[in-house]
Amino acid sequence: MSFLRRSLHLLIALALAACTGGPDTRARANVADSARDDFGAPIAFNTTPRRIVSLNPATTELLFAIGAGDRVVGRTHWDNYPPAALAVTDLGNGIRPNVEAILGVHPDLVLLYASADNRLAADRLREAGIATVSVKGDRIADFRRLTLLIGKLVGSESQAKQLVDTVDQTLARVAAETRSLPRPRVFLHTWNKPIITLGGGSFVTELVNIAGGRNIYDSIPAPSAPVSIEDIVRRDPDLVLAGPEAVAQIKADPTWQVVRAVREGRVVAYDTNVVFRPSVRLGEGAVAFEKLLHPRPR
């Protein structure tokens, strides 16, 4: 995989967990019961960080949402929300990051994405005396857990709790609005060569369920997996959901014409910046899916 393609895939991987890689084990414990990150490394809560590097778009969004954005001194190239994050120093990729660049902004806390590719960086940062916490979220429950954890880490516990409550209220409202509606069967496209879809282990499948749809690959336990065009044809989705650029590619590619939904023009774009990040905008993601799956005057 070329560097450019790997970088593009990172935007998906940071939120969804790529088909390969990721932490070996992840405790889904309550913050009160856990003092370890998703690599199993101990977490200290004794000092409030003043200079934070966040190398994960989801955690960057979260830090700004709970009032710690003014302490963020480093981000990845992909961290584009909220707009204020763009003023933060861009440290490049969040997978196999440049440790020297991180040290150059003098952080006292680094938040990493818990990919196996980041273990070495986490070890090197700790050896340099930098508090380092590696986290990963595949499910909506992980958002709740990680929000409370990071809120405690940065001294914004009440704001973190309020954020979780607000997101939960939106998710509950969308679920109530769609509970009695027909449930269109959807194919969630994330990558084309090979074709990669989202499975039942992804929070995106949860959002589709909340929004009144069903992922045709919800039986796959992993967050994502490669699939064949023949199997997509066999499962015959009502809708194909893909990123804006991928929609145009799918419509123009003769290979995809064997899929009835594509042939009949039922290929719909969704906002990957909103949907692919298990963070502050989970509620917004559910609302976006509801509008795509059940369009009606509002």
Image (cartoon, rainbow, N blue to C red):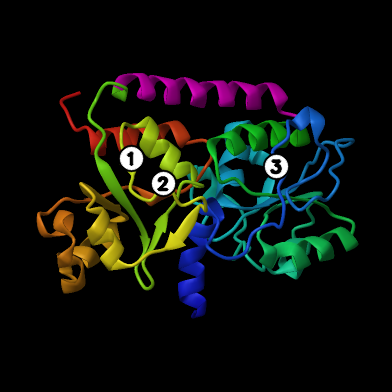
What's under tag 3, amino acid-wise? Arg
In the rendered image, the vertical position of residue 281 relative to residue 249, given as above or below: above
- 3D distance between C-alphas at marks 2 and 3: 39 Å
In the image, 182 versus 95, the foreground residue is 182
Query: Which residue corresponds to the image point at 9% horizontal and 54% vertical from the top-left?
Result: 264
What's under tag 1, amino acid-wise? Arg
Marking on residue 218: 2
Residue 190 appears in which quarter of the rendering?
bottom left
Query: Which residue corresponds to the image point at 73% horizontal and 30% vertical from the top-left?
Result: 30
**Is residue 142 toward the left or the right of residue 221 in the image?**
right
x and y, in percent, of residue 189 in the image? 34, 57
Residue 172 magenta? yes
x and y, in percent, of residue 66 in the image? 62, 31
Marking on residue 214: 1
What's under tag 2, amino acid-wise? Asp
Query: Which residue corresponds to the image point at 39% horizontal and 31% vertical from the top-left?
Result: 210
| Mark 1 secondary-structure assignment | strand
Residues at circles 2 and 1 in contact by the CB criterion of under 8 Å: yes
Q: Is residue 128 visible?
A: no
